[in-house]
Image (cartoon, rainbow, N blue to C red):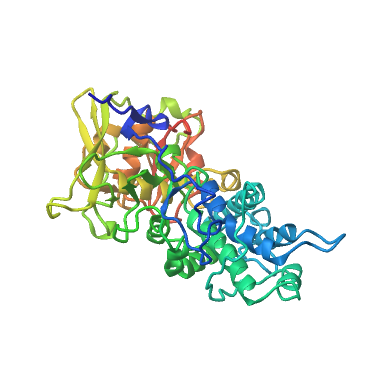
Amino acid sequence: MAAARPLHRIPGLDGLVLGRMISTATQTAIDPINHPAHGNSSNWRFQPGTYTTKQLVEHVAPLLNSLIAQLGHDPPGAVPSRTILIEGLRSCLATTGRESTLPIGDASDMTGESARKEMATQAKRIGSLLVRCAQDAPPPSATNPQVSVRSPCEGHVWTRDVADLLIGPRSNGNLMQVYNEWLHQIVLLRDGLLPFENFDEVQLNVKHEGTRPLEDIRSKFLMQIMTAQVERTTLVDAAKVLTAPGLPSGGYGFQYASGIVMPISVFTGGPSILLRYVPAIVDDSQHHELLFDYENKDYFSVPREDIKEPDELIPSASSVPLMKLSPSTPKLASGSMAIETPPEAKTFSQVRYIKLCGVFEDGAQFSVDVGQVTRGLRYAYRIVSSNVDNQNGFVQHWSFGLHKASDVLSLPNLVTATGDSDGVTLHAIQAGNAMVRFALLGKLYPENVVLLSGNEQPLTRALGVGKGFGPRLVIIGGEPVPS
């Protein structure tokens, strides 16, 4: 009898279980003898299989090796052809410069925290890794000097040194296409890795065309990155291309044969838009590819209800420590994640809902859609140094309503606070732990929700963030331990 797979736990959520770990030691090995660019075949093609990022770069290396072999020996004292061609790749993967294929700019020149800055940092990290992988690719034991490939011009701008080399007397039309294919495969790989925080670990499934399936979504994805308007749907769809291409569009995460992909915010509690690959499976049914979708695709239209009257009302609490403010919430007795098939789904639906479920010691229960939690994490306001000095900028007179988390989470609908909430400016809720904090983020309507750490900060700090109208819903404490 096979041993049970170990549980996958989320450290930041007090070890909450999310599926079971799986082995990833199934990636395709590269056979240097039978590889099409090493053997007798002259027409290069990709060998289908599962690859890590490093392995995939190594798999296209025969294109570069054959190109260099066909160029012949470098003249004495000349810069080596390999150096010129790899430096051309570096320039194409850069986020600045004439040859950049993603001219988003340098993250160090961007102020504040934004999706554009995060993606600029991500692109730079991935580009550096891909160049290192190209440089470190093992030299071939044998090279096919006859390899050829039909590679349409993709509009990538070559460095002047590359142009001099490949348009010069040592080259020919076929070699220009070989270089273009090598370059394009790696540029597309960079684009396909952009959604993944741990891009060096993700397992990629490729077919004969390599990374070219990314071409269909590339323009839309890169345009959103350039304009700092990256939609979750586009990010997740881009992540599926080289992992789970059989899944429909949409969702906030997914499962495929090599693991699960979820927003990194589920593991860290931060505002990052990126995704994390985890070698685990949450559903052992016959369907390897599953889409984790929002229970409510349009949360604007779902029923809402106003938060109840506070347990305690304080006219001004700026001098009272946070931990002494919130009324005592019963401790959480148990917590779990549940996988559900949509009620209206057909027998073999690929869609699943993930619910964050909990029971308090007083018997109060909650079940919150994890998709809505990810929305809450993305749209919540956080206290940063730039807004601390403006804590009285919106409100001249304030009052504080204190609520129990168990009371809020027991309500059936999304919870909001209107301007008629008994004149209360801030509705404060003590989270207690990371799981309750996450549950509150999935229960509160994500419009004027503020996250405040539980380290004795005054509640008035929440007045400096959020919209200038309406009360604020303030979640206190419960920060997860990053994982």
Residue furthest to the front in view is 40
Q: Residue at x 76, y 76 (%)?
A: 169
Image side of residue 75 versus residue 253, left or right? right
Q: Residue at x 52, y 44 (%)?
A: 200
Q: Position of residue 431 (x, y in %)?
A: 37, 32
For the N terminus, give its image quadrant: top left
Residue 466, above or below 176: above
Give 259 or 195, whichever is nearer the viewer.
Answer: 259
Image side of residue 367 versus residue 155, left or right? left
Residue furthest to the right in view is 77
Image side of residue 424 versus residue 161, left or right? left
Residue 323, above or below 208: above
Image side of residue 316 versus residue 435, left or right? right
Q: Position of residue 235 (x, y in %)?
A: 43, 58
Residue 208, above or below 173: above
Give 153 or 295, whichever is nearer the viewer.
Answer: 153
Q: Position of residue 185 (x, y in %)?
A: 53, 62
Q: How many circles with numbers are drawn on the protein? A: 0
Residue 196, above or below 174: above
Give 223 or 254, whichever is nearer the viewer.
Answer: 254
Q: Position of residue 291 (x, y in %)?
A: 28, 52
Inspect this view and state whether residue 444 appears.
no
